[in-house]
Amino acid sequence: MSEPRTEAPFGRRLAPLEANRELGAYRLLAVRDPDGPTNPRPGQFYMLATAEGWGADGERPYVPRAFSYARARGDGTLEFLLEAVGPGTERLGRVSAGESLWLTGPLGVGFRVATDPKARHLLVGGGIGVAPIVCLSDELGERGEVLLGFRTAAHAEAATLFDHPAALATDDGSAGRAALVTELLRERLDRSGGEPAVYACGPPPMLEAVRAICAERDVPAQLALESGMACGFGACFGCVAPTRNGYVRLCVDGPVLDAADLDSALFAGAGH
Amino acid sequence: MSEPRTEAPFGRRLAPLEANRELGAYRLLAVRDPDGPTNPRPGQFYMLATAEGWGADGERPYVPRAFSYARARGDGTLEFLLEAVGPGTERLGRVSAGESLWLTGPLGVGFRVATDPKARHLLVGGGIGVAPIVCLSDELGERGEVLLGFRTAAHAEAATLFDHPAALATDDGSAGRAALVTELLRERLDRSGGEPAVYACGPPPMLEAVRAICAERDVPAQLALESGMACGFGACFGCVAPTRNGYVRLCVDGPVLDAADLDSALFAGAGH
Amino acid sequence: MSGAFDLCGVPLRGPVLNGSGTFDAIAARRTFGDRLLEEFPFDAFVSKTITIEPRQGNPPPRLWESPAGLINSIGLPNKGLSGFLSGDLPQLAELPVPLVVSVMGFSRDELGALVAAVGERDQVAMIELNVSCPNVETGLVMGADPAETAAAVGAVRPLTDKPLIVKLTPSAGDPAVAAAAEGAGADAVSLINTLRGMALDPRTRRPWLGAGTGGLSGPAVRPVALAQVASVAASVSIPVVGMGGIASGRDALDFLDAGAACVAVGTENFRDPAAGRRIARELAAVSRNERGFSAGRTRFSQDRPKSPAKVGKTVK
Amino acid sequence: MSGAFDLCGVPLRGPVLNGSGTFDAIAARRTFGDRLLEEFPFDAFVSKTITIEPRQGNPPPRLWESPAGLINSIGLPNKGLSGFLSGDLPQLAELPVPLVVSVMGFSRDELGALVAAVGERDQVAMIELNVSCPNVETGLVMGADPAETAAAVGAVRPLTDKPLIVKLTPSAGDPAVAAAAEGAGADAVSLINTLRGMALDPRTRRPWLGAGTGGLSGPAVRPVALAQVASVAASVSIPVVGMGGIASGRDALDFLDAGAACVAVGTENFRDPAAGRRIARELAAVSRNERGFSAGRTRFSQDRPKSPAKVGKTVK
Ligand SMILES: Cc1cc2nc3c(=O)[nH]c(=O)nc-3n(C[C@H](O)[C@H](O)[C@H](O)COP(=O)(O)OP(=O)(O)OC[C@H]3O[C@@H](n4cnc5c(N)ncnc54)[C@H](O)[C@@H]3O)c2cc1C
Ligand SMILES: Cc1cc2nc3c(=O)[nH]c(=O)nc-3n(C[C@H](O)[C@H](O)[C@H](O)COP(=O)(O)OP(=O)(O)OC[C@H]3O[C@@H](n4cnc5c(N)ncnc54)[C@H](O)[C@@H]3O)c2cc1C
Ligand SMILES: Cc1cc2nc3c(=O)[nH]c(=O)nc-3n(C[C@H](O)[C@H](O)[C@H](O)COP(=O)(O)O)c2cc1C
Ligand SMILES: Cc1cc2nc3c(=O)[nH]c(=O)nc-3n(C[C@H](O)[C@H](O)[C@H](O)COP(=O)(O)O)c2cc1C
Ligand code: FES
Ligand code: FES
């Protein structure tokens, strides 16, 4: 299985905004990237910044921010799902028609998916972490079963992005089952006996639960992790996660790592 | 004659943009300042910055920029004439509907105008320096004769701001006479024999010529000077001009100085 | 909250001062009128540094902006000691907050004369020693090394009962200098002063500032300031006045959490004349939101992770 | 322009390098493929600092942003000397530009072993000595004082014919350290390294970085860097590689005009992987527009206001 990495054009490029719409608690940004590859691999990500007004007033943000692509439409349009959690995501969430983004990517290695057409796949997304699960689900179609968890119904609107039906849980029960998505995962694995491979993205505590659940059951799992990134292409050595083989840079050796390489998906600097 | 200074409300305030239109080579900004005084004095100025996107991308501008008000409409609207010469004026020139400016002022002391109704006044403006001449001309009406100089006809469109007729010169002769405004001044003073008081604002070489011409003829002159300002209210001691009494801060002791106090209006740091 | 909080025994209504040389209360009153007094932005006012003789300051240009900051080469213009005492002090005495007078001498004698003269005025609550200049006697920058600092502070300490704040030079990230000041009798230290910086004239390609180089301040230096404040606060037990790029209440809280007893606002005053008030308000809000209690003595004297400041020392 | 310009006798196609530790050409090639080689952004490539033993680096988090800058506590992760020679060097040798290897030793012996081993490789054009760490033998930061720097450079100078660039520590704004390096046989100096800085975790209110403090870089430090480069360039006659916050061709021109022979781009690479190329292009454009001639030997070796660099020294 070759590394699921589509090479990026060298350097950053200007990508005009096509749309910026509210999607429940999140925003969905579509940008035109005619010069980028149309085939990034699910789990790869892009570094984004606004072309104007990035870090105004002498304050953060200064470096760009990392975002998994949610969908690459074949026509050169990329879609990103955003949650505003700080100055960078807030500024990006306010881009308006006529503005452009600085974009570098696709970056990192995506999910390694067995090519065996009979292999079964379990896709687990939590919160904003559903973004790379969207394109992975597109790719796997019926072969990929999707489990999603959100805080509230407002966040769960992101589930409408999926073309295939997905099982849904919310923390407060305002949409789908009142449960953590890891409970759905545990039940699902215990039902099936553990044959499928698991692919997950979400907040660190969720990923750690996924890791532990899969480890107990000897189910292979791949986790798309997050840590603070400055460059996204291996230059700064800032985005490391501790693995059984020492620190690895999530932007070039990840963001998708084999769960088996981790003692824990919860580490200092994990998440945003 | 009391000091021509209208006190400013303490602190900066948000002033919503009312209009931003092209005026030849310049831009005319109108902002709503309902909480500021409606009676600033000609020659006083305001510190301006955009509320958003000031100094984005980790670069200048960082501090606000100084602008003479061109007109204070009695209804709480202020008008500024802007020339884009660097990052701050470029950003201000791009403010658009819905945006606001941070504004502090009115600041400094304006032109000291003899209250004697029979006194005659000669107003000289060069380039962007016509801004404070507009409101001074409004105030003096028929008693103020206006001489204006610009580089080209495109710049000379700023002459349309004046309600009263003004003599016009351009460097290239594309509007009015092909001459420097200081030649108009010299001719005018030699014609009348020098009774009027002169009030001038413009680039340092023009102000120095005005100073020298008036000094030769013993005509009292007041010059609105410029230097780099960080604060505009006397806090930083950065905006000094050398006078016969030592350095003075243009933001609190000026920007209008008596020409008689200057050895030269051309000094290191003069102008923008 | 009045009386609940103090710096070196001087009661303050809150912990937000100005950095010396970044607010001229007299010029501000000319500009803003008496509203300045009603809405005075600081909890204590620090004067611009004064010297024995009057100084015109450096030739212009004196300012250049840099990313998230400002470079200045002002050169300590001031009326000199007697001009200050007769001209400025009566006006500064009208401010609604305690007055700190910043002084700089080019020898220990000069420093002593300034401290003695300023210290005997009732209007003066504290004295700040700006020791960032070379000592004409030894050639060393007074505040750059521990022994020189101790000698300067030791020389002036007997001359006044007023609390002495020693403003450390930026090269004194070395906490030994702060410790030396404490050992010689300083009641508090303040830091950071500006970092040496330069900019070129975009047209002539020669140094832009009249003085060649200048001092860098503003948010650009904030991480450097925070590191120095944390390291100094961990090594002295007198209060630390922290400054350098503070532009919001959250920034102020960072300095307090790093061990400062008070904070000072400098360059941000230029962007917003009322910045001190805004920052105090924001600080109260973030303290309330994030800690469950509001600013005040407890907050600033006891809840710091390292080296609690020795507050409550009496003035005389 | 090829051959028209050189650094310490090594011909370079232009004056734009990268700062050590701010570009990993091997990782970048994995990311961008062979287009990286075709459009290689620097005129010489400086490796991340290597040490004798492999290092994992500091615990995360390792990065925090600050106004117009970045604070990092990476901690020099690297494969160690033998890992570098066997694993990285063959790949770095494929780059289309000369290779500078940055080395750091915790004793003079370690430094010597690194210089000797790296210096004998043909693929290596120059060696940069990163002397920002404490010497385990003397306890002093190797690059912090003139004598210590001279001893370190003097110890390794006989071990190689390759040009040695000494990367000064930021505290070495003191030009005496640069002069000591020159006196001990350095062929060039480079500066500035990062300034010590700190940030707090917005939630826990404790230091954010895993290592407590880190190094500040980016435009925030540019004025400090420019002042130090100008002062060092005025006091040595070997070439100076200037860096610190360079983000545009105009910034690069400022450093060249302040006396640098070459410039290096660091943090800006993180915002724009091709920043080196853009900056070189912008530099050529501003040089042409404002000087009437384009970049090249004349420009960089003779048109500097102070202390022209000693270029043209041969490698062996
Ligand atoms: C590979 C990857 C893919 C991602 N995909 C998406 C996506 O598809 N959609 C999306 O909305 N977000 C995504 N993120 C997260 C996104 O990058 C962050 O939300 C964003 O960087 C936050 O920036 P900010 O300025 O809004 O917040 P800030 O508060 O400035 O955070 C900026 C950075 O600072 C660090 N940081 C700040 N606070 C903390 C903290 N408390 N704990 C740990 N680190 C902190 C992190 O490095 C963070 O990225 C992804 C991150 C990575 C690494
Ligand atoms: C009292 C006063 C009233 C003014 N009124 C007006 C007005 O009505 N309309 C208007 O358009 N402008 C006016 N100006 C000028 C205006 O403030 C400057 O054009 C503006 O500050 C430039 O900012 P910038 O960021 O665009 O350019 P920058 O290049 O950043 O210039 C910003 C500041 O840097 C300094 N500077 C930069 N380059 C030079 C240089 N080559 N020589 C000297 N100084 C330099 C100056 O201090 C300048 O103000 C006034 C200035 C003052 C002091
Ligand atoms: C324009 C200017 C003038 C200053 N003058 C003085 C001074 O006279 N005495 C002094 O001790 N510090 C002086 N400082 C330093 C400040 O008090 C403060 O230490 C420094 O600016 C860092 O704080 P800031 O980043 O908030 O500005 C001056 C700073 C500036 C910007
Ligand atoms: C993430 C990061 C890692 C760095 N690693 C090294 C290093 O390994 N060796 C070294 O000599 N300098 C290192 N530096 C310092 C840079 O080479 C450079 O001196 C400094 O960042 C200033 O330049 P800049 O402002 O353009 O980044 C590092 C800087 C950063 C930001
Ligand atoms: S983000 Fe820079 S190395 Fe990963
Ligand atoms: S602009 Fe600050 S004193 Fe005048």
Image: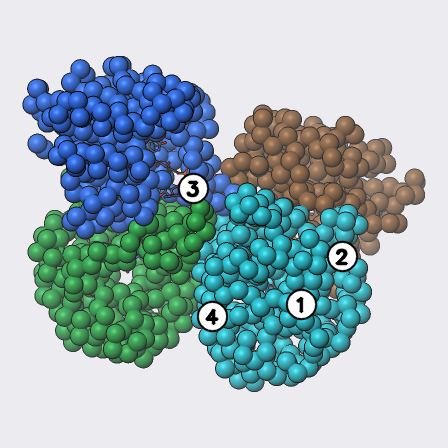
Chain colours: A blue, B brown, C cyan, D green
The location of residue D18, given as percent across then percent down, is 28, 53
> Alpha-carbon distance for marks 3 and 2?
38 Å
Residue under numbered circle 3: A61
The location of residue A137, given as percent across then percent down, is 22, 21
Q: Which residue lies at the image location 65% right of the left edge and 59% below the top edge?
A: C5
Q: Which residue lies at the image location 28% right of the left edge and 78% below the top edge?
A: D138
Which of the two labelled residues, at mark 4 and mark 1, occupies the earlier sequence position? Answer: 1
Q: Amino acid at mark 1?
A: Gly
Residue under numbered circle 1: C9
> Alpha-carbon distance for marks 4 and 1?
21 Å
Q: The C terminus of chain A appears in which quarter of the rendering?
A: top left
Residue C235: give its label: 4
Label 1 C-beta lies within 8 Å of the nearest ligand 3 atom: no
Q: Is residue A162 above or below residue C264?
A: above
Question: Which label sits in the foreground, 1 or 2?
Answer: 1
Q: Secondary structure at mark 3?
A: loop
Q: Amino acid at mark 2?
A: Pro
Label 3 C-beta lies within 8 Å of the nearest ligand 1 atom: yes
- Quarter assignment of residue A151: top left
Q: Are marks 3 and 2 in contact (CB under 8 Å)?
A: no
Which residue occupies the foreground of this view, D99 or C306?
C306
Q: Amino acid at mark 3?
A: Pro
Question: Which label sits in the foreground, 3 or 1?
Answer: 1
Pointer 4 local density, CA inside 10 Å: few below 14, some 14–19, many at least 20 = some
